[in-house]
Image: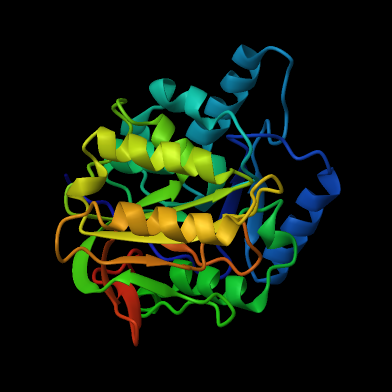
Amino acid sequence: MNILIPKALRRGEVIGLISPSSTCAEPEKIERAVTYLERCGYKVKTSLYLNRSEHDPAHTDRYKLHDLHQMFADREVRAIFCLRGGAGATRLLDRIDYGLIAANPKILVGYSDITALSLAVFRKTGLVNFSGPMAATELLAPSSYTEEHFWGMLTDPGYSKHLTNFSEHPISCIRPGAVTGRLVGGNLSVLSSLVGTPYLPSFSGALLFTEDVNEPAYRIDRMLSHLFNAGLAQKCRGLMFGQFSKNPADENRDYRFDKMFTYYANRMHDGVPVMTGLSYGHIRELMTLPVGARCRLEISPERFAFGAVDAPVSR
């Protein structure tokens, strides 16, 4: 695969906003996000159909595809930020003009339901993109941790070499090891729905990272077993479990999750490191991760070192 690296974002450049997933029910959040981005020194261009939806999903999909294609075609736009997650991005994958995206590589950011778009774009074009904060959720008033990782990742080619976890997110080493692999992952529910489609990147030699929100333990177990039954997880060089936000129905949640992650770690080949606690998920202190970039993970009970081997943005 030919890997495409977007150019680093510079102050004064234009950021485009699109809404490939759900709409935002509180438009004032969009205004706050635009204000924040402008205060950071950037110009903001909102897409023609931003935050617009219809009862007929066919109409809504046309709006989303128009805006996605328009923003990649617009030479003035240097980065594309998604509005929020939710649902709907998977419906777009078979109608995206991947040739257009490959011909106009630029920064693309989003997570949660945007996992579908992120993985499909990397699989079809080789464009490294970013699983990170979105305009109408985190970027209204980001925490200092989220802000530092976000702008550092997008503006400084050297920043990603050494990524640190949030101090209050304890890391657990289930299996130690040190490996290098291409970073693939995102929201587990969305990722697992892409199994068997042409939009899921190869797991061979990958570092897999996952998270999820409000899913009970039995559903997470089912999705992980699906990755193993499909013969995908075993091909990975490392597993990185992020934050799995609580579901109120889960009893003894932490115990059940710990046992479940240990169970799947033990199904990996010898020498494959497995960890939990990565600062990634539906959380306030959110690490921005470069999907498709070659990264190195070293994990032991005493040490956590993680970062990109190759810069995910260029000068």
Residue 292 appears in the rendering: no
**Which quadrant of the structure image shows residue 20?**
top right
Question: Quarter-wise, where is residue 311 in the image?
Answer: bottom left
Is residue 31 shown above or below 279? Answer: above
Residue 156 image-quadrant placement: bottom left
Identify which residue, 211 or 313, lies in the foreground. Answer: 211
Q: Nearer the viewer, residue 284 or 76?
A: 284
Q: How many marks?
A: 0
x and y percentages locating residue 288 in the rendered image:
49, 64
Q: Image check: 247 left or right of 270?
A: right
**Residue sitting at x 41%, y 51%:** 106
Instruction: Kindly identify the residue that appears in the image at 34 percent across and 87 percent down.
Output: 302
Residue 204 visible in image: yes
State which quarter of the image contains the N terminus: top left
Q: Position of residue 178 (x, y in %)?
A: 20, 74
Q: Position of residue 101 (x, y in %)?
A: 37, 38
210 or 267: nearer the viewer: 267
Task: Tell me the colour scheme of the image.
Answer: rainbow
Nearer to the camera, 29 or 179: 179
Relative vertical location of residue 292 with respect to residue 42 in this rendering, above or below: above
Tell me which residue sits at (64%, 48%) in the image: 250
Spot occupied by residue 315 in the image (x, y as percentages of width and height): 34, 70
Task: Determine whether 218 is above or below 32 in the image.
Answer: above
Left or right of residue 275, residue 113 in this image: right
83 relative to 265 in the view: left or right: right
Name the residue rendered at 68%, 12% in the picture. 56
Q: Is residue 135 left or right of residue 221?
A: right
